[in-house]
Amino acid sequence: MKNVLVIAYYFPPTGGGGVQRVTKFVKYLPSFGWRPVVLTVKNPDFDIFDESLMEDIDEDVKVYRTYSFDPIRWYRVKRYGPGSRFEPIGRELVPGNRRLLTRVLFSPARMLFKCIRYVLNNLLLVPDDYIGWIPFAVFKGLRVIRKEKIDVIYATGKPWSAFLIALFLKLLTGRPYVLDLRDPWTITPYGNSEGIKQMLERFWEKTCFSYAKKVININEQITNSYIKYYPKIPPNKFAFITHGFDPMDFTNVRGINSKDEFIVSYVGTLYSNTSPDNVLRSVSSLVHDKPDLKNGMRLKFVGFVPDHVRRMIKDLGLEGIVETAGYFPHRESIQHMLASDALLLLLNNSGPSNNAQVSTGKLFEYLASRRPILAVIPKDTDAAKLINEAGAGRVVDPDDVREIEKNIYEMYVDYKNGGLKAHTADLDRFDRKNLTRNLADILNAVQPESS
């Protein structure tokens, strides 16, 4: 059995979609001759936790947890209190700090405060807010590599600080490393860095990629974009392994819809690049034109919902039609999928080019649920291509409100007429175990010959 050091900031019991990929790799790697040893944090800057995910981690898997100094978290707690990053209550100023904050912002010290914040955001906190994890993880990683006789290092990002940890460990020990990007780094179409910070991030990205034995992305679009972006890096260094689903997660799970209404669900946290604004406008217009739909359909968000979305639901008068169910553990979220008549997938247009478009992980569990998908996503993405090839649903441009409205109504009519059909596409290639086999093949190819 060969040994791989898995570097992951987000790891169970941390929850959320970003944890699924590495958790399933750790679960299935032993089936292909690799013993995972995990290096993660003991105090993650996150507040989604799902203890049920620990069931996927075999008791024999060694998990080393280190401290991480996160100044941004400290600042956020001081300003907003210990409330959730996602729940509205977490975004309120701490009453005792309001007067203090006002004095800071409207005093001669304001300029000093801005200068410190600029230095932190653009010069020190690069490549991300979690550089405070790097020294602790490198120190612990050196000991773990010797103790556990590690052959290969695998790092998943973001946060991209995990990649710097892999780089430093490689330079200090000579062990080869593989990088796994759950999203594109500097070529992301959403909210990229600017100025000095962008230059520094690109330096670190190029350096990490250059020393890596393999750079794995989640779809072919991102892989091809990076090949074009870094022409001096050998193209065969880049590969992709898609997100997937674990059939075991669907075993003995049933979704029960006790009401006679058309339920469309979005399962997952809403982020800036998965805005439901146009969908809400479409639903508002639809029920205005066809009032009988008010009692015949429901749009449900299963996960954390930002304040502005809640306000929009209220402003559009959709409280009786749109439900915000809150966050659920992973297995229960699958129950919500299976209790739905259709599933909503969201991804905003990113501008003139979608070459590095992301593929949301929930798509593959949507496919596994066999529920029809309403994909409000750019039509030239890998996700759109996959849905069309599988015959798994409809793809609608995110900016076309009328087209969204038209497709929602057509799916509602199909539902009433018994015409909503489950797709029958072969999904074996997206089975988490088969995807882990692909990762194991990469690890086999990059391990030192003497191992």
Image (tube, rainbow, N blue to C red):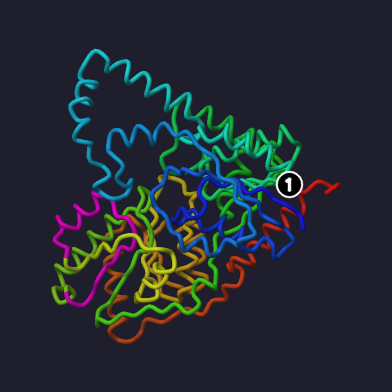
Q: Residue at x 39, y 73 (%)?
A: 335
Assess whether residue 312 is covered by the magenta stretch: yes
Q: Looking at this view, is 325 or 300 the one in front?
A: 325
Q: Looking at this view, is 185 or 22 the one in front?
A: 22
The spot of residue 52 in percent (x, y) is: 46, 63
The spot of residue 18 in percent (x, y) is: 48, 53
Residue found farthest to the bottom: 418
Toward which corner of the image does residue 300 lie, by quadrant?
bottom left
Q: Is residue 319 left or right of residue 30?
A: left
Q: Secondary structure at mark 1?
A: loop
Task: Note whether residue 162 is visible.
Answer: yes
Toward which corner of the image does residue 167 lie, by quadrant?
top right
Circle 1 sits on which residue? 150
Q: Residue at x 62, y 54 (%)?
A: 240
Quadrant location of the N terminus? Answer: bottom right
Q: Residue at x 46, y 46 (%)?
A: 353
Assess whether residue 96 is covered by the magenta stretch: no
Residue found farthest to the right: 450
Q: Amino acid at mark 1?
A: Ile
Task: Note whether residue 231 is visible.
Answer: no
Mark 1 Cα-neighbour bin, 10 Å: few <14, some 14–19, many ≥20? many
Q: Is residue 418 left or right of residue 92?
A: right
Q: Residue at x 27, y 55 (%)?
A: 277
For residue 247, above or below residue 266: below
Span of residues in magenta: 295-319
Residue found farthest to the top: 108
The spot of residue 42 in percent (x, y) is: 50, 44
